[in-house]
Image (spheres, rainbow, N blue to C red):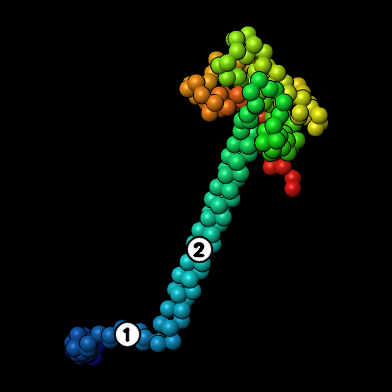
Amino acid sequence: MIRLARLAPLALALGAITTLDACRRKPTPEPVPVTNADSIARERARQDSIRMANEAAAARERARQDSIRLATEAAERELASMRTALTASIRFDYDQDDLRDDARATLEAKLPILNANPGLRLRIAGHADERGSEEYNLALGQKRAASVQRWFAERGVDAGRFELVSYGEERPVCTQSDESCYAQNRRAEFEVTAGGATLVRPRP
Protein backbone atom coordinates (compact mmCIF):
# COMPACT_ATOMS: atom_id res chain seq x y z
CA MET A 1 0.00 0.00 0.00
CA ILE A 2 2.85 2.32 0.85
CA ARG A 3 4.57 1.44 -2.50
CA LEU A 4 1.39 2.23 -4.49
CA ALA A 5 1.03 5.56 -2.77
CA ARG A 6 4.55 6.48 -3.81
CA LEU A 7 3.91 5.55 -7.44
CA ALA A 8 0.78 7.70 -7.78
CA PRO A 9 2.62 11.06 -7.92
CA LEU A 10 5.00 9.59 -10.49
CA ALA A 11 2.12 8.49 -12.70
CA LEU A 12 0.54 11.92 -12.46
CA ALA A 13 3.81 13.56 -13.45
CA LEU A 14 4.19 11.31 -16.51
CA GLY A 15 0.62 12.07 -17.59
CA ALA A 16 1.23 15.79 -17.35
CA ILE A 17 4.41 15.50 -19.43
CA THR A 18 2.60 13.51 -22.07
CA THR A 19 -0.22 16.07 -22.18
CA LEU A 20 2.22 18.97 -22.52
CA ASP A 21 4.10 17.16 -25.28
CA ALA A 22 0.88 16.56 -27.15
CA CYS A 23 -0.03 20.24 -26.85
CA ARG A 24 3.35 21.30 -28.22
CA ARG A 25 2.94 19.14 -31.33
CA LYS A 26 1.69 21.00 -34.40
CA PRO A 27 -1.21 19.45 -36.30
CA THR A 28 -0.15 17.61 -39.42
CA PRO A 29 -1.27 19.64 -42.45
CA GLU A 30 -3.52 17.89 -44.96
CA PRO A 31 -1.74 16.98 -48.17
CA VAL A 32 -2.17 19.51 -50.97
CA PRO A 33 -3.48 17.76 -54.07
CA VAL A 34 -0.91 17.68 -56.78
CA THR A 35 -2.12 19.29 -60.02
CA ASN A 36 -1.64 16.91 -62.89
CA ALA A 37 -1.11 18.58 -66.30
CA ASP A 38 -2.33 15.48 -68.10
CA SER A 39 -5.57 15.50 -66.09
CA ILE A 40 -6.19 19.15 -66.96
CA ALA A 41 -5.56 18.44 -70.65
CA ARG A 42 -7.93 15.48 -70.59
CA GLU A 43 -10.66 17.56 -68.92
CA ARG A 44 -10.22 20.35 -71.45
CA ALA A 45 -10.41 17.85 -74.27
CA ARG A 46 -13.58 16.37 -72.75
CA GLN A 47 -15.18 19.79 -72.41
CA ASP A 48 -14.17 20.67 -76.00
CA SER A 49 -15.65 17.40 -77.22
CA ILE A 50 -18.93 18.14 -75.43
CA ARG A 51 -19.01 21.68 -76.83
CA MET A 52 -18.31 20.49 -80.38
CA ALA A 53 -20.96 17.79 -80.10
CA ASN A 54 -23.50 20.36 -78.91
CA GLU A 55 -22.58 22.73 -81.73
CA ALA A 56 -22.86 19.93 -84.27
CA ALA A 57 -26.27 18.94 -82.91
CA ALA A 58 -27.43 22.57 -83.06
CA ALA A 59 -26.18 22.85 -86.65
CA ARG A 60 -28.05 19.68 -87.63
CA GLU A 61 -31.24 21.02 -86.04
CA ARG A 62 -30.85 24.33 -87.88
CA ALA A 63 -30.33 22.45 -91.13
CA ARG A 64 -33.41 20.32 -90.44
CA GLN A 65 -35.53 23.37 -89.68
CA ASP A 66 -34.22 25.13 -92.82
CA SER A 67 -35.07 22.07 -94.89
CA ILE A 68 -38.60 21.98 -93.49
CA ARG A 69 -39.02 25.72 -94.09
CA LEU A 70 -37.77 25.51 -97.67
CA ALA A 71 -40.00 22.52 -98.42
CA THR A 72 -43.00 24.31 -96.91
CA GLU A 73 -42.29 27.48 -98.89
CA ALA A 74 -41.90 25.46 -102.11
CA ALA A 75 -45.19 23.66 -101.46
CA GLU A 76 -46.94 26.97 -100.79
CA ARG A 77 -45.54 28.47 -104.00
CA GLU A 78 -46.63 25.44 -105.97
CA LEU A 79 -50.11 25.57 -104.43
CA ALA A 80 -50.39 29.28 -105.25
CA SER A 81 -49.25 28.59 -108.81
CA MET A 82 -51.91 25.90 -109.28
CA ARG A 83 -54.61 28.17 -107.89
CA THR A 84 -53.51 30.94 -110.22
CA ALA A 85 -53.71 28.57 -113.17
CA LEU A 86 -57.16 27.37 -112.12
CA THR A 87 -58.59 30.88 -111.80
CA ALA A 88 -56.98 32.40 -114.89
CA SER A 89 -59.70 33.90 -117.10
CA ILE A 90 -60.05 33.61 -120.87
CA ARG A 91 -61.32 36.04 -123.50
CA PHE A 92 -63.61 35.77 -126.51
CA ASP A 93 -63.98 37.58 -129.78
CA TYR A 94 -66.87 39.93 -130.36
CA ASP A 95 -70.24 38.18 -130.36
CA GLN A 96 -68.52 34.76 -130.28
CA ASP A 97 -68.52 31.80 -127.90
CA ASP A 98 -65.87 29.81 -129.77
CA LEU A 99 -62.61 29.30 -127.90
CA ARG A 100 -59.62 31.22 -129.23
CA ASP A 101 -56.13 29.69 -129.36
CA ASP A 102 -54.95 31.70 -126.36
CA ALA A 103 -58.05 30.58 -124.42
CA ARG A 104 -57.31 26.92 -125.21
CA ALA A 105 -53.74 27.36 -123.93
CA THR A 106 -55.11 28.74 -120.65
CA LEU A 107 -57.54 25.82 -120.35
CA GLU A 108 -54.73 23.35 -121.10
CA ALA A 109 -52.94 24.58 -117.96
CA LYS A 110 -56.03 23.81 -115.87
CA LEU A 111 -56.59 20.31 -117.29
CA PRO A 112 -53.79 18.37 -115.47
CA ILE A 113 -54.72 19.99 -112.16
CA LEU A 114 -58.34 18.94 -112.61
CA ASN A 115 -57.28 15.41 -113.53
CA ALA A 116 -55.01 15.13 -110.48
CA ASN A 117 -57.72 16.41 -108.14
CA PRO A 118 -61.03 14.63 -108.81
CA GLY A 119 -62.69 16.43 -105.89
CA LEU A 120 -62.01 19.83 -107.45
CA ARG A 121 -65.03 21.84 -108.59
CA LEU A 122 -65.11 25.08 -110.60
CA ARG A 123 -67.65 27.77 -111.26
CA ILE A 124 -67.43 29.12 -114.82
CA ALA A 125 -68.90 32.61 -115.20
CA GLY A 126 -69.58 33.93 -118.70
CA HIS A 127 -69.43 37.69 -119.39
CA ALA A 128 -70.13 39.97 -122.34
CA ASP A 129 -69.41 43.56 -123.27
CA GLU A 130 -72.12 46.21 -123.12
CA ARG A 131 -73.16 46.02 -126.77
CA GLY A 132 -76.44 44.23 -127.34
CA SER A 133 -79.45 43.81 -125.11
CA GLU A 134 -79.21 42.54 -121.55
CA GLU A 135 -81.09 39.37 -122.50
CA TYR A 136 -78.82 38.71 -125.47
CA ASN A 137 -75.68 39.25 -123.43
CA LEU A 138 -76.91 36.96 -120.64
CA ALA A 139 -77.49 34.24 -123.23
CA LEU A 140 -74.07 34.90 -124.79
CA GLY A 141 -72.37 34.67 -121.40
CA GLN A 142 -74.09 31.33 -120.81
CA LYS A 143 -72.91 30.05 -124.19
CA ARG A 144 -69.36 31.07 -123.40
CA ALA A 145 -69.41 29.24 -120.06
CA ALA A 146 -70.94 26.19 -121.74
CA SER A 147 -68.24 26.14 -124.44
CA VAL A 148 -65.59 25.91 -121.70
CA GLN A 149 -67.46 23.10 -119.97
CA ARG A 150 -67.78 21.26 -123.27
CA TRP A 151 -64.05 21.63 -123.97
CA PHE A 152 -63.19 19.96 -120.64
CA ALA A 153 -65.84 17.24 -121.11
CA GLU A 154 -64.32 16.36 -124.51
CA ARG A 155 -61.05 15.72 -122.67
CA GLY A 156 -62.54 13.40 -120.07
CA VAL A 157 -63.41 15.80 -117.25
CA ASP A 158 -66.88 15.16 -115.84
CA ALA A 159 -69.17 18.03 -116.85
CA GLY A 160 -70.85 17.78 -113.44
CA ARG A 161 -67.73 19.23 -111.83
CA PHE A 162 -68.55 22.64 -113.31
CA GLU A 163 -71.19 25.11 -112.24
CA LEU A 164 -72.19 27.49 -115.04
CA VAL A 165 -73.39 31.04 -114.52
CA SER A 166 -73.80 34.05 -116.79
CA TYR A 167 -73.54 37.68 -115.77
CA GLY A 168 -73.89 39.07 -119.26
CA GLU A 169 -72.81 42.72 -119.22
CA GLU A 170 -73.55 43.19 -115.50
CA ARG A 171 -69.98 42.89 -114.16
CA PRO A 172 -67.55 44.69 -116.44
CA VAL A 173 -63.88 44.86 -115.46
CA CYS A 174 -63.50 47.97 -117.59
CA THR A 175 -66.17 50.66 -118.00
CA GLN A 176 -64.94 52.75 -120.91
CA SER A 177 -66.84 52.40 -124.17
CA ASP A 178 -63.97 51.43 -126.47
CA GLU A 179 -62.64 48.25 -128.02
CA SER A 180 -59.88 47.83 -125.43
CA CYS A 181 -62.47 47.67 -122.65
CA TYR A 182 -64.88 45.59 -124.70
CA ALA A 183 -62.12 42.99 -125.22
CA GLN A 184 -61.51 42.72 -121.48
CA ASN A 185 -65.20 42.30 -120.71
CA ARG A 186 -65.75 39.47 -123.22
CA ARG A 187 -64.50 36.75 -120.93
CA ALA A 188 -65.07 33.65 -118.84
CA GLU A 189 -63.90 33.64 -115.24
CA PHE A 190 -63.19 30.67 -112.99
CA GLU A 191 -63.72 30.18 -109.26
CA VAL A 192 -62.81 27.13 -107.18
CA THR A 193 -65.95 26.04 -105.31
CA ALA A 194 -64.71 22.78 -103.77
CA GLY A 195 -61.53 20.76 -103.31
CA GLY A 196 -59.13 23.66 -103.48
CA ALA A 197 -57.78 23.61 -99.92
CA THR A 198 -55.19 20.89 -100.53
CA LEU A 199 -54.39 20.42 -104.18
CA VAL A 200 -52.34 17.48 -105.41
CA ARG A 201 -49.55 18.26 -107.84
CA PRO A 202 -50.09 16.71 -111.28
CA ARG A 203 -47.70 13.92 -112.17
CA PRO A 204 -45.10 14.84 -114.80
Q: What distance separates the C-alpha of mark 2 from that of mark 1?
A: 43 Å
Is residue 10 shown to the viewer in this render?
Answer: yes
Q: In the depicted view, which residue is nearer to us: 167 or 137? A: 137
How packed mark 2 is, by other alpha carbons closer than 10 Å (few <14, some 14-19, many 20 or more), is few
- Give the residue number, with chain letter if any, for mark 2: 59
Give SS at disc 2: helix
- Give the residue number, with chain letter if any, for mark 1: 32
Q: Quadrant of residue 179?
A: top right
Q: In the depicted view, which residue is nearer to us: 27 or 8? A: 27
Q: Amino acid at mark 1?
A: Val
Q: Position of residue 142 (x, y in %)?
A: 68, 16
Q: Position of residue 157 (x, y in %)?
A: 78, 29
Q: Height in image: 80 above or below 61?
A: above
Give the label, 2 or 1, closer to the camera: 2
Q: Height in image: 172 above or below 120?
A: above
Question: Which residue is at 41% across, 82% downward?
Answer: 40
Question: Which residue is at 67% across, 33% downward?
Answer: 103
Give SS at disc 1: loop
In the picture, which quadrant includes the N terminus?
Answer: bottom left
Question: Which residue is at 74% across, 45% downward?
Answer: 203
Q: Position of residue 115 (x, y in %)?
A: 75, 35
